[in-house]
Structures are given as C-alpha cells and as structure tokens.
Image (cartoon, grey):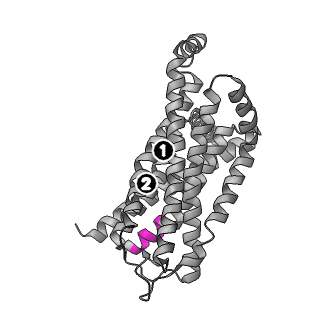
Amino acid sequence: MDIRILKAFIFILLTVTGIPGNLYIVLQFLVIRLLEKKLLPSNIILQVLAFSNLLIVCSRVIPQSLNALGIEDLMDGINCKISGYTYRVSRAMSICITSLLSCHQCILIAPNTKIWAYLKKMVSPNITLIILAILLMNLALYRTSFMYADARNNNTSPYTLHLVYCDTDFQTYVSYIANGVVFASRDFLFVASMVLASFYIVYVLLNHKKTVTSILYSNRAKSKSIEYKASKAVILLVICYVMFMGLDNSMWTYTLTLSNVGTNMNDARVVLACAYSAVCPIVIFVTNPKLQQWSRYTFWRRHQDQRSSSSSEIHLKHISI
C-alpha cells in the first residue's frame, strides 16, 4: 500500500473519530450545565479535556489529512503560526488537564486526614480557577511558537521540524535542544504526577476494600460504588495517555539527537499525539454515568415524540375518514 494512502486513511480515521466524539462530550456537558444549573468538578475537568482534544484534532489532524490527500500549500506564515500555537497550547492543556483529573480523583478518595481534608476543601470548589491558571501558564509558555513557525521553504537550518505545510526552525542547536528538553521535561513531570496519583488511587481502593464493600451492600441498586467507577475511568484515561504520549515523547527525545528530521518521523509523532484525542471521548462516554443517563433520556424522549407523532397522524386520519 502506498504510504500516502495509508497516512490519509489514518488521519481521516482520527478526524472522523475525534471531532464528533469530543464535540459531543463538550455539548452534552454544556446541556447538563444549562438544565441542571451545575456541573460536578470532575465533569468540568472532562469538558475542558474534550475541548482541548477537539482543538488538537482541528489544528493538527485536519491539515495532516488534507496534505495526505494531495492538497499542497494550504497555509501561509500567519496560518502556520496560529495553527502551531493552537496545537501546542491544546496539547499542553490535554496533558495538564489529564494530570489534574487524576490528582483531583486522588484527593476525593483519600482518607479524611488533616492534609487531605484541606485539599478537598480547597481544590474542588476552585477547580475553574485552577484550570484558568493552567491555561494562562500554557498560553504564556508557548508564545515562542510564533517565533519559530513559518510556511514551508527551502532556506531552513538543520534544526528544523518539517510539519506538512509548516516548518518550525529553531535556527541554532542550543535553541533546538533547549526547547526539546524544557517541554519534554514538562511532559514527563505531568505524566509522572498522573501515574503516581493513579497508583495511589489503586492503593486507597485496595486498602479500603471493606469500606467499598459496605457501600455496595448499602446501595444494592448500583453494582459498583461511585468512587470505584470514577477511579476506574481516571485510570483508563491515564493508561491511554501514558501509552500514546509516552511513545510520542520517546520519539521526540530521539529526534533531539538528529538533524533535519524527516516528515515520516513527524507524521508518526502526530499520529501518537492525536490518537489520545480520538480515543479519549470514547473512554469518557463509556465510563461516565451522567453522559449515559442523559443519552438514554434523550433517546427515550425522541422515541416518545416519534410515537406521539405517529399516534396523532393515525388519529387525524380516522377523523378525516
């Protein structure tokens, strides 16, 4: 199979999976927020995560798909800067929000000691402010993207990343290495925090098995406790992130030892980085009872409306006869 056809298939698959899935999660939580006048802190985090993943797919996967289909010279210098900046900030938000989600769940299920009680009191009520602070940090951190990104040209230095329509030229070896080390270290730091939080979640659940069992027996309508279900969802998201982004960061670290990195290497990194954005909404929907409840309710209302409409049409026919 031609490598270009394979690329087109993979990127189109990521697009048709990532955009509808993440858009559905964002809009569904928005509807819940409007109708119920509130949204749980964990669901606020999931909504921001889905929106970040949506921007990742739109800013990076769509251009990759169009390029793989043979559309050339789609972006000029300004569009490259905007697209690159949007992708980098969105990708940073995705890793930071996933880490925040795991740490938040870790705090929720932790025992009520003095320190954990203080964190529970401070984190959940201020989750929106925490997310805003993370966003401002990433917006400031990636402002250098406007300096290095530009449209594709033949006058680039050996320290350039070729990303379909755009080049990211770091110009000097020091800038190239410094940029790579800073952002790779940031990624590994957040990955380490989410992994440690996940291990602690598992540890707490195992050490409070009796408590969890008593919760199950006290509420037989539910097959599993709310804490267990939420923790399982967080752990699945962390596993997906570590699997995809871990490979992406490993490849990124490897490219720091190279010059004039080829487009195939960068395309492989894009696939790994964006695969999480496409898989994430599926995991969120499958493990989130609130979304499933509202989906069933919406389906039931639509079914009832169709039955009512059919009954009305039959009644009108009898009257006309």
The quarter of the rendered structure image containing the C terminus is top right
Picture residue at 58% right of the left edge, 26% below the top: 227
Residue 150 image point, x, y percent: 52, 81
Disc 2 crowd rating (10 Å Cα; few below 14, some 14-19, many 20+) is many
Residue holding disc 2: 275
Name the residue at 43% across, 57% down: 249
Q: Nearer the viewer, residue 46 or 36?
A: 46
The residue under the point 46% across, 47% down is 241
Query: Above or below — where is 159 with respect to 251?
Result: below
Q: Where is residue 175 in the image (x, y as percent from the top left)?
A: 51, 73
Q: Give yes or no for residue 228 being in the magenta stretch.
A: no
Q: Which residue lies furthest to the front in this view?
A: 174
Residue 301 in view: no
Q: Quick check: is 63 in the magenta stretch?
A: yes
Determine if residue 105 is in view.
yes
Residue on which disc 1 sits = 282
**Image vertical order of residue 280 relative to residue 261, above or below:** above
Magenta-highlighted residues: 61-67
Tell which of 225 and 262 is nearer to you: 262
Marks 1 and 2, how far apart in space? 12 Å
